[in-house]
């Protein structure tokens, strides 16, 4: 045991690892989660993991018993009904809810449970729907039902404070900040507002207050004593401004994984959960725990199979069943999934929920404290953590840490950069706003104008726009589960230290220098450019398929003739690439210019495919979108499409680019550099027309790959073709191409697109014995020294200048030839 772990156990040993359970954490992890070897899973707030024993029990049960549709009276149906009833009680027990007072309604998840409350709640124009700012979109979505019925909607910030003169729990106070009311319809506004104050005409209206037991963004746990205060009208002064009865909804989807609301102590009217958040399986199953009195107030309009006692098809006659579960559960419930819940609760009961809470809190607290200690070489903080825990009681925070990272100069690392680098290190985490816009805006510091301008700038959920106008648009989140270990925590901390903490490295003139202040070009290898030559030319006719090398090749306005002129689309119109379809890498291509044919070969196809380059397909033209660029394409017939479908093992369509619709742009202050959208004609390339890599840079990368392998084994080396370049040059110095602005080869001139080529995980794919293998290299090593502003750069992108000038290449056809001299300009 290392010193760090010994220190951790000295502080947290009483809480970490389930010391009182039949099996400790190390034994549990080794026996039940062998699939996690070499991986650090830290997205338990998104979905926790199922155990091997749990799934073995589920499979054994299903293979040993016959369960029928519970809407019947035969033996197999009655067996299902009995189990469903038993599991309902098990769920109520988990929330310490008496079956006399509460019912368990099974839904397809927490979101479906919230939707059920929203659509069945008896809204009126005198009602109010109020919710805390820190709420999931699924809770916010209820307001659409409220607003459509003329109700008032309002968001509030709730801050827990303690009267310093008192030490009793009952003296705990809440500071409430109310946001502006939302209302639809001017007549309704006039009806319910007098002298700027909200009033109600009737005292019989029903109001709803919603809050999470634990915020899925920050991990902040809300004090559940809010329930009684709200229901009794004692929650500060807001309830006195809104007459009628207040009901309370708790979103426990996140909180119930470590601390399910105790409904005997905190009798909320509605509580929602999803079971995969608690023990990983089954997905697509959740529950609404509803108080009997509250359930009787819900107005269910729709009826379905299982919800009616009797109905007549051709007249307006229906009698609904009396049971709350029967009325609110539409159709046949997911009875096999419900049966499997027993085996999820089995492991929770073995460990106990209180021990799980302490175990996960110890890990989160340890990591949170270590993150706050991380400093750059100039003593600036690396981590900005949102919603930090109380020092006196770390159990007041859930096992979630949400943060952003800063560079030494105070600028932000984008959260997508963090996520990509984490993936290279085998770390699974989550980024964005986690469907919690209120908490995200609150903690990250985004105003309404920021949010609107970000949207107008093109930012939407799940995109790569992680920093706009110098501000993060979201954050990074890690979260711990019941099977998380100290080793997971340490691996994550090592990742932060190695990837984001700046430190003095290297010597320059006898002084330490910081790598972040250096150009990407290695200073030690700069020298005068001498005798750079073209080593190889490779054409890739079909996007993501194999290319072929040539000694010479003609240029057109689109770059190398026929390069990336074809691609494959899936049955839904999506572009197929090696990242999605590794089988594409086994398709060989060759173009014979004299014969005017494209030849294709696949190990899965008996016959080779020949396609005429001169065939007129204008009658099969269409428009497609490829990564935001619109193209006019020509498609092929069934024979060609069937060949490719057989080659990759899925239905697909083969299309050829006939023209692209492009835009032009400039970069202010950079007269000699072009941005991505140039005026050049583009085929199906991602950015520039040609990709150039340097053999000298490849050699330097391989030396780093060899030296980084510390176990004495031969490191994985790469050749230039791993990067799918069009042209490879040699005779320069490593990474000197980063500074090139323009170059000419023979009598052809090219402009270097500013910024270099941003690499992705596709360069980690390679073939071995006919199989596509995915590794972490070389991208992980490149990330350690070729990372700039969130991009991992290797190689440069070129545009052929004749295309930009509009010169007719039919008049003067220029060729590239292996061995030609390359003259770069910096």
Image (cartoon, rainbow, N blue to C red):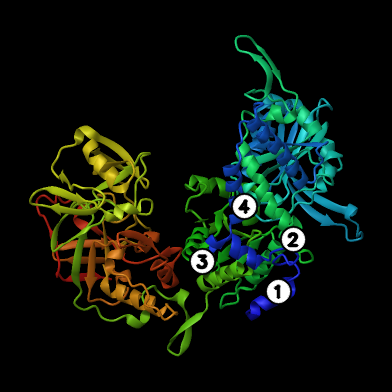
* Alpha carbons under labels 2 and 3: distance apart: 26 Å
Is there a contact, CB below 8 Å, between mark 4 and mark 3? no
Q: Which badge, 4 or 1, is on the more N-terminal residue?
A: 1
Tell which tag, 4 or 2, sits nearer the viewer.
4
Circle 3 SS class:
loop
Q: Which residue is mark 3?
A: 38
* Alpha carbons under labels 3 and 1: distance apart: 23 Å
Q: Residue at x 62, y 52 (%)?
A: 54
Q: Which mark is residue 9?
A: 1
Q: Which badge, 4 or 2, is on the more N-terminal residue?
A: 4
Q: Classify 10 Å Cα crowding around label 3: few (below 14), some (14-19), many (20 and above).
A: few
In the rendered structure, the answer to whether residue 720 lies left or right of residue 420 reads: left
Q: Residue 479: image x %, image y %?
A: 62, 59
Q: Residue at x 64, y 37 (%)?
A: 107
Q: Residue 269: image x %, image y %?
A: 78, 38
Q: Which badge, 3 or 1, is on the more N-terminal residue?
A: 1
Q: Which residue is mark 4?
A: 54
Circle 4 SS class:
helix
Q: Which badge, 4 or 3, is on the more N-terminal residue?
A: 3
Q: Classify 10 Å Cα crowding around label 2: few (below 14), some (14-19), many (20 and above).
A: many
Circle 1 SS class:
helix
The relative height of residue 662 versus residue 823 in the rendered view (above or below) is above
Is there a contact, CB below 8 Å, between mark 2 and mark 3? no
In the rendered structure, the answer to whether residue 134 lies left or right of residue 296 reads: left
Q: Classify 10 Å Cα crowding around label 1: few (below 14), some (14-19), many (20 and above).
A: some
Q: Which badge, 2 or 1, is on the more N-terminal residue?
A: 1
* Alpha carbons under labels 4 and 3: distance apart: 22 Å
Q: Which residue is mark 2?
A: 355
In this rendering, does residue 258 appear at all?
Answer: no
Instruction: Place residue 184 in its image quadrant.
Output: top right
In the rendered structure, the answer to whether residue 269 lies left or right of residue 582 reads: right
Is there a contact, CB below 8 Å, between mark 3 and mark 1? no
């Amino acid at each position: 045991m290392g010193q760090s772990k010994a220190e951790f156990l000295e502080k947290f040993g009483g809480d970490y690892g389930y010391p009182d359970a039949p099996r400790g954490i190390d034994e549990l992890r080794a026996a039940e989660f062998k699939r996690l070897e070499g991986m650090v899973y830290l997205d338990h707030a998104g979905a926790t993991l199922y155990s091997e024993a749990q799934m073995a029990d589920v499979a054994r049960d299903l293979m040993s018993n016959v369960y029928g549709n519970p809407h019947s009276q035969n033996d197999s149906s009655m067996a299902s009904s009995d189990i469903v009833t038993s599991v309902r009680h098990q769920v109520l027990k988990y929330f310490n809810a008496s079956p006399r007072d509460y019912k368990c309604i099974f839904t397809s998840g927490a979101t479906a449970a919230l939707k059920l409350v929203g659509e069945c709640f008896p809204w009126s124009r005198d009602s109010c729907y109020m919710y805390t700012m820190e709420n999931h979109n699924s809770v916010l979505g209820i307001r659409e039902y409220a607003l459509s019925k003329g109700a008032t909607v309002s968001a509030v910030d709730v801050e827990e404070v303690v009267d310093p003169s008192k030490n009793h729990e009952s003296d705990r106070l809440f500071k409430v900040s109310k946001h502006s009311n939302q209302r639809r319809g001017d007549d309704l506004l006039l009806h319910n507002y007098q002298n700027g104050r909200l009033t109600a005409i009737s005292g019989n209206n029903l109001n709803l207050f919603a809050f999470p037991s634990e915020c899925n963004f920050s991990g902040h746990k809300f004090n559940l004593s809010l329930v009684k205060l709200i229901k009794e009208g004692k929650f500060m002064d807001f309830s006195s401004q809104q007459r009628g009865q207040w009901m309370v909804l708790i979103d426990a989807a996140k909180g119930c994984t470590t601390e399910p609301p105790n409904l005997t102590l905190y009798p909320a009217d509605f509580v929602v959960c999803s079971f995969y958040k608690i023990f990983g399986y089954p997905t697509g199953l959740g529950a609404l725990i509803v108080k009997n009195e509250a359930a009787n107030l819900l107005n269910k309009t729709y009826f379905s199979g299982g919800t009616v006692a009797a109905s007549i098809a051709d007249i307006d006659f229906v009698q609904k069943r009396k049971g709350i579960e029967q009325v609110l559960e539409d159709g046949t419930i997911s009875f096999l999934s419900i049966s499997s819940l027993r085996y999820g609760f089995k492991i929770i009961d073995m460990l106990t929920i209180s021990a799980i809470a302490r175990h996960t809190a110890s890990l989160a607290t340890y990591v949170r404290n270590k993150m706050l200690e991380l400093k750059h070489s100039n003593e600036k903080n690396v981590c900005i953590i949102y919603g930090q825990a109380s020092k006196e009681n770390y159990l007041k925070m859930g096992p979630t840490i949400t943060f952003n990272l800063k560079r030494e100069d105070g600028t932000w690392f984008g959260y997508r950069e963090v996520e990509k680098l984490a993936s290279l290190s085998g770390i699974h985490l989550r980024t964005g706003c986690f469907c919690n816009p209120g908490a995200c805006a609150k903690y990250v510091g985004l105003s309404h104008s920021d949010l609107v301008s970000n949207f107008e700038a093109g930012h939407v959920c799940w995109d790569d726009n992680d920093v706009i106008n110098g501000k993060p648009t979201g954050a990074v989140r890690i979260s711990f589960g019941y099977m998380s270990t100290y080793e997971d925590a340490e691996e994550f901390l090592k990742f932060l230290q190695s990837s984001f903490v700046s430190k003095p490295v290297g010597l320059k003139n006898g002084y330490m220098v910081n790598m972040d202040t250096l150009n990407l070009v290695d200073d030690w290898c700069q020298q005068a450019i001498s005798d750079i030559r073209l080593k190889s030319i490779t054409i890739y006719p079909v996007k993501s398929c194999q290319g072929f090398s040539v000694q010479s090749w003609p240029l057109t306005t689109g770059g190398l003739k026929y390069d990336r002129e074809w691609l494959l689309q899936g049955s839904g119109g999506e572009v197929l690439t090696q990242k999605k379809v590794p089988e594409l890498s086994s398709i060989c291509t060759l173009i014979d210019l004299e014969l005017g044919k494209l030849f294709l070969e696949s190990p899965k196809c008996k016959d080779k495919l020949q396609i005429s380059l001169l065939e007129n397909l204008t009658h099969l033209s269409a428009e497609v979108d490829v990564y935001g660029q619109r193209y006019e394409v020509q498609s092929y017939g069934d024979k060609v499409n069937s060949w490719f479908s057989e080659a990759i093992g899925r239905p697909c369509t083969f299309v050829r680019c006939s023209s692209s619709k492009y835009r032009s742009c400039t970069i202010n202050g950079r007269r000699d550099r072009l941005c991505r959208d140039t005026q050049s004609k583009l085929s199906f390339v991602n950015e520039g027309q040609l990709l150039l890599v340097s053999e000298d840079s490849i050699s330097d990368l391989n030396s780093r790959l060899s030296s980084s392998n510390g176990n004495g084994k031969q490191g994985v080396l790469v050749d230039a073709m791993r990067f799918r370049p069009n042209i490879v040059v040699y005779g320069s110095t490593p990474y000197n191409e980063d500074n090139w602005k323009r170059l000419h080869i023979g009598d052809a001139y090219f402009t270097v697109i500013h910024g270099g080529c941003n690499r992705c995980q596709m360069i980690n794919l390679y073939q071995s014995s006919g199989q596509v293998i995915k590794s972490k290299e070389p991208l992980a090593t490149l990330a350690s020294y070729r990372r700039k502003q969130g991009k991992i750069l290797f190689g440069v992108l070129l545009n052929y200048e004749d295309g930009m000038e509009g010169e007719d290449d039919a008049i003067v056809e220029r060729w590239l030839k292996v061995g030609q001299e390359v003259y770069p300009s910096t």
